[in-house]
Image (cartoon, rainbow, N blue to C red):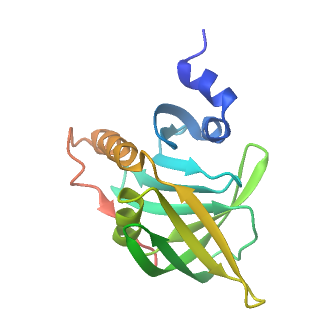
């Protein structure tokens, strides 16, 4: 018999993307927690209507967490891009570092590591949505938005699991917020 998360995954775009990464164990609002197939990382993430993703990824082996955005676009690995992040919890100029491409299911994403971990975390946890304005070469902006309903409880649950995997039962104080600059 299929697990509940496999049945859910087949019926949803978020789930379909997460099954490729590993087993989703819970869903909070538009956010889902999952462990990678390899067990290397756990994450709490969401997909928007355009199929882009936003998520916090934690690596229990080294105790580090980071915010990633996945867009259906091109980027040059290692290149930094300026971005304006905005949500009900505030606004901040952040940098997105291209971490290369990754195929998830049928979609190839460019993955970006977001700077200013704590600012992004606050915006995600304190409102109904977060948006990112990316400058384009033509003087225009690309805006990408994500719903944050359920994000706080999803992130807390994921970080508890990451802490347990790291050997710190019930506490995520040992996990370090990570920025790659």
Question: Is residue 141 depicted above or below 10 in this figure?
Answer: below
Question: Is residue 172 depicted above or below 80 in this figure?
Answer: above
Residue 54 image offset from top left, x and y in percent:
55, 57
Q: Quadrant of residue 138?
A: bottom right
In the picture as drawn, the residue positioned furthest to the top comes out as 1
Residue name at image x 60 percent, y 26 percent: 8
Residue 103, visible in the rendered structure: yes
Residue name at image x 59 percent, y 82 percent: 80
Query: Could you tell whether 174 is left or right of 126 in the image?
Result: left
Residue name at image x 41 percent, y 68 percent: 120
Residue 67 image offset from top left, x and y in percent:
47, 62
Residue name at image x 56 percent, y 36 percent: 22
Front-most of 175 and 52? 52
Q: In which quarter of the image is residue 21?
A: top right
Residue 41, visible in the rendered structure: no
Front-most of 153 and 117? 153
How many discs appear? 0
Q: Quadrant of the N terminus?
A: top right
Residue 102 image offset from top left, x and y in percent:
69, 56
Residue 19 image offset from top left, x and y in percent:
62, 35
Front-most of 152 and 18? 152
Question: Is residue 27 depicted above or below 178 in this figure?
Answer: above
């Amino acid at each position: 018999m299929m697990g509940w998360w496999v049945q859910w995954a087949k019926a949803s775009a978020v789930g379909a993307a997460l099954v490729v990464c590993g087993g989703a164990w819970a869903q909070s609002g538009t956010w889902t927690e999952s462990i990678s197939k390899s067990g290397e990382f756990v994450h709490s993430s969401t997909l928007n209507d355009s199929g882009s993703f936003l998520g916090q990824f934690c690596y229990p082996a080294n105790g580090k967490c980071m915010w990633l955005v996945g867009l259906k676009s091109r980027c040059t690995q290692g290149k930094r891009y300026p971005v304006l992040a905005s949500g009900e919890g505030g606004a901040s100029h952040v940098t997105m570092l291209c971490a290369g491409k990754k195929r998830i299911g049928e979609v190839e994403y460019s993955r970006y590591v977001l700077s200013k971990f704590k600012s992004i975390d606050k915006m995600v946890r304190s409102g109904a949505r977060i948006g990112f304005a990316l400058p384009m070469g033509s003087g225009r902006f690309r805006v990408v938005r994500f719903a944050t309903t359920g994000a706080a409880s999803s992130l807390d649950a994921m970080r508890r699991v990451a802490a347990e995997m790291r050997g710190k039962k019930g506490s995520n104080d040992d996990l370090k917020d990570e920025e790659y600059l």
